[in-house]
Image (tube, helix red, strand yellow):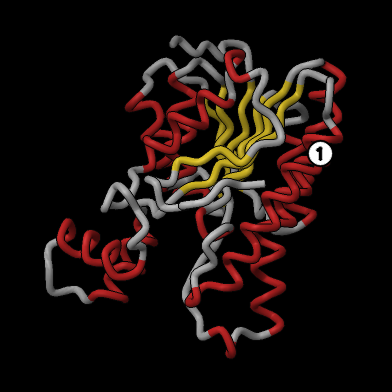
Amino acid sequence: MHVDLSGRTAVVTGSSQGIGLAIAIGLAGAGATTVLTGRGEDRLREAREQVLDRVPDARVTPVACDLTTEEGAALLRAEVPDADVLVNNLGIFGPADPLEITDEQWRTYFDVNVLSAVRLIRAYLPGMKDRGWGRIQNIASDSAIVIPAEMIHYGMSKTALLAVARGFAKEAAGTGVTVNSVIAGPTHTPGVEEFVHDLVGRDRPWDEAQREFMRLHRPQSLLGRLIEPPEIANLVVYLSSEQASATTGGAVRVDGGYVDSILP
């Protein structure tokens, strides 16, 4: 299948590293003008170089902004007034004792992982509807379905993203705009590497450590390993394409067989 996003502009939040950067590389490789976002200008410059290293003729625009704030969202909108593809990847995670998660932590996880996505959907969806074409994707997590005991606040935020995507898909019904969630399973990123080592120790090679983590903490996985970011990017690029025109309001899984259930 050949995905051609030439002439499309794609905004990817939280795209200076990890899953977001892999998605940006994938969309750039399909021909989209790709907008990288993050708070640090230096890291964004490095990310842009990584995209150009993989896709030398890519059109890449870095925009430094804090999308956890209304001001940051407004700054992005001023720099990029319209988008054809919006990938809400920005998010935070971390373990915590369930009974010791503070009110402030609950609010922070909701503000960063959910409200930042809602703001940008409100900003870009009207233009997509007017033009009769658009693709919006929220990067959710298996934790939205199989809530981890050590990350209830994170799981809550990712469950909320499923509702956000489903609701806005109904708002966009019949307009040529699709809105979906991508349920990503445990994925190999620098932050997750730290998380894995914190749980299983640092005295073993990475491949052994990740497989021990999966065995002990994510035993439902059929892969038995962490997913690599480009594997998630492949699905995102497809959902951003013309070929995915009939997929909307869905929670599409790239979870390595971790979620052993059928979503309603």
Q: Where is residue 205 in the image (x, y as percent from the top left)?
A: 12, 62
Which residue occupies 56% across, 38% down? 252
Residue extending furthest bottom?
A: 100
Q: What element carries label 1?
A: helix
Residue 220 vs residue 133, the one in the foreground: 220
Residue 135 vs residue 223, the one in the foreground: 223
Please, is residue 208 above or below residue 6 in the view?
below
What is the total number of numbered labels drawn onto the structure image? Answer: 1
| Amino acid marked by disc 1 | Ala
Q: Where is residue 64 in the image (x, y as percent from the top left)?
A: 60, 46
Left or right of residue 108: residue 49: left
Q: Where is residue 225 in the image (x, y as percent from the top left)?
A: 27, 52
Quadrant position of the N terminus in the picture: top left
Please, is residue 69 above or below residue 231 in the view?
below
Please, is residue 194 above or below residue 207 in the view?
below
Q: Where on the picture, by quarter, is residue 79? A: top right
Left or right of residue 52: residue 27: right
Residue 163 vs residue 92, the one in the foreground: 163
Q: Where on the picture, by quarter, is residue 198? A: bottom left
Left or right of residue 98: residue 131: right
Which residue occupies 71% across, 27% down? 178
Q: Where is residue 189 in the image (x, y as percent from the top left)?
A: 36, 53
Q: Within 10 Å of the Cα at label 1, are there few (<14), some (14-19), or many (20+) other Cα atoms?
A: some
Residue extending furthest left?
A: 204
Which residue occupies 43% across, 46% down? 255
Left or right of residue 150: residue 10: right
Which residue occupies 54% across, 66% down? 147
> For mark 1, what is the residue?
123
